[in-house]
Amino acid sequence: MALDGVTLYYLVRELAPQLIGTRVDKIHQPEKEEVHLLLRGQGSSYRLLLNASATAARFHITTVNKKNPVTPPMFCMILRKHLEGAKIIAVEQEGLERLITFVFQNYNERGDLATYHLHLEIMGKHSNLILVERVNIIDGLKRYSHALSRYREVLPGRPYLTPPSQGKLEPTSDEDTWRAALYGEDNREDESENLSSKLTGILLKRLAGVSPELARELVLQAGLVEDTRLEQCGDIDLSRLFQSYRRLACPQPESPIEPCLYYMTKQASAFTFLPFQQYQSLSRESFASLNACISRFYDLKSSGNTLEAKRGSLKKVVQEHQAHLSKKLNIYEETLAEARSSLAYQKWGELLTANLYRIQPGASETTVEDYYEANLPQLTIPLDPQLTPNENAQRYYRLYNKAKATLNKTEPLKESALAELRYLESLLVSLEQAASLPELEEIHTELAEQGYVAAKSGPGQRNKKSGKLPDPVPRSYYSSTERQILVGRNNKQNEWLTLKKAKPTDLWLHVKEIPGSHVIVPLADGEEFPDDATLEEAAALAIYFSQARGSSQVPVDYTHVKNIKKPKEGKPGMVIYDKNWTLYLTPKTEVVERLLESGE
């Protein structure tokens, strides 16, 4: 959800008392379209984040300290020149527009006390951060001329013009004025068009500070359905709609708020200043302040974006190696097919040797009896007229020996490539199912150790006392009978879990011949198998954390850890076993969900 004008009103109302009177201590620009102002005053310090990106334009106080570039960007240097040491004297919003102005006082180069305005314009892809002294622009985070905007230029020295007004109705408590705006009575053509338009679209078009989400909420809280059209509304419907408008879209200094953050499948989905009916099916978290709510939302969103970017870059590396291996396999297959077809040359050489006396010098072919076949069929063998019959036989022996050598050399290469492809498939499964940056970092380390990517410089996160890397932390779940089930998060964890963590008598599970996680059920001394419920639920987890997720009647192999071995020169997580049992299972959704909820 983007910051709409109403939400910004409440955010300004909340933060202005904290920010006014503070002084700018430092200024950083950690990202291309994001500036951090480090403020001190009133016995407190704050990090004010100002973002002018197309998808996440906003402002709020944050505790996240991002890494800064070695060389500060030009706009950052300009802000430092004019605003370092400056005092914030006002934080203002233009009506319910998404235009926030921070007013500073500071001494200029001449030693005079000057007033500076830092305008944060939250306008989607046109969002910007512009520093102004008096009426002229000092500079903007994004510069553009009349070639991009006929209305105004954002260039040093040009006069600052606020974004053009959209002519929307400012908050009003007069229902007649509100209805007139809703019907577009100032424009008769507009009025006729409005009648057949959806209420949500009309509210968005006519009322200041309203976003698509808020417009939808106004309609729902009025007891109407989202697709309701204006012509379908009676007088009572409009009265209820006005009341929901007064309650949600007419912010007042004393209006109470209850900031909420909504989650969909553990991912932050939206934030609101009051509980919204449209999100009632989602899990909700309440916050004491709107700033904390908004900050948490964008922190989670940023983490999610970073997670997906990291996942995407690692997947690209793996997929590129897969494509390269696939090309090599095609070459191996063609080479092997050609070599196999050349194995017949041994028989040709032996048939020629047995019939040398019958072959005429200079002949281009000869027909002999194929005594390798029961019915002695006639076989015509091509000859090189430039060679003697014996030389032709020796040539076929050489071609056979070459084909045999090619087979002996290429078969291991093909098997190695197939094994590496299976390993890369397992990496892709781990990447798809990684839920955090540390998990992706473990996979990155594994890729570096296998030579697929460059290793990161600097030591890993070793224990300060022992100097050793900490033990991996596999996923841990509990069955319906309270038995622990351990699941590896990636290949290295799979290997550690099976070959180092687990006892020889513990039970090991893995989906048959499909990339996936190793699953361990710890067993007590003298216990051969867990109860049936735990066995089935461990198998369900093995399926869920594999490439077979969502499939039915999936074969899951299980055996004791003592039967598991790592093949010589095998890749991480690759194991072999020759004694096992197989369970065919279609996991039930409710069982898997309960298991996942039991995770630590």
Image (cartoon, helix red, strand yellow):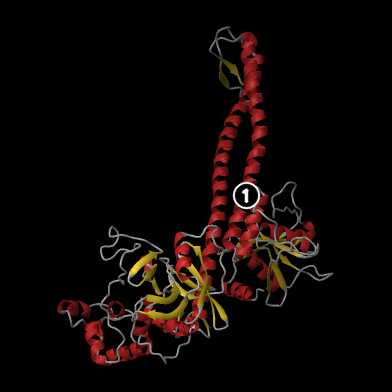
From the top left corner, tell me how far across and down residue 71 is, in percent.
Answer: 52, 57
Q: Residue lying farthest top?
A: 361
Q: Residue at x 70, y 66 (%)?
A: 473
Q: Quadrant of the C terminus?
A: bottom right
Q: Residue at x 46, y 70 (%)?
A: 83
Q: Examine the rendered structure and indicate whether residue 70 appears above or below residue 41.
A: above
- In this view, the residue in front, 208 or 261, is 208
Q: Examine the rendered structure and indicate whether residue 134 appears above or below residue 332.
A: below
From the top left corner, tell me how far across and down residue 224 is, in percent.
Answer: 33, 85
136 left or right of 559?
Answer: left
Q: Residues within 10 Å of mark 1 (few under 14, many from 20)?
A: few
Q: Residue at x 50, y 64 (%)?
A: 29
- In this view, the residue in front, 406 or 304, is 304
Q: Secondary structure at mark 1?
A: loop
Residue matched to label 1: 454
181 left or right of 131?
Answer: left
170 left or right of 433?
Answer: left
Q: Quadrant of the N terminus?
A: bottom left
Quadrant position of residue 436? bottom right
From the top left corner, tell me how far across and down residue 245 is, in percent.
Answer: 33, 87
**Residue 504 makes an appearance in the image:** yes
Quadrant position of residue 390? top right
**Residue 265 makes an appearance in the image:** no
Q: Residue at x 45, y 60 (%)?
A: 74
From the top left corner, tell me how far across and down residue 138 is, in percent.
Answer: 38, 65
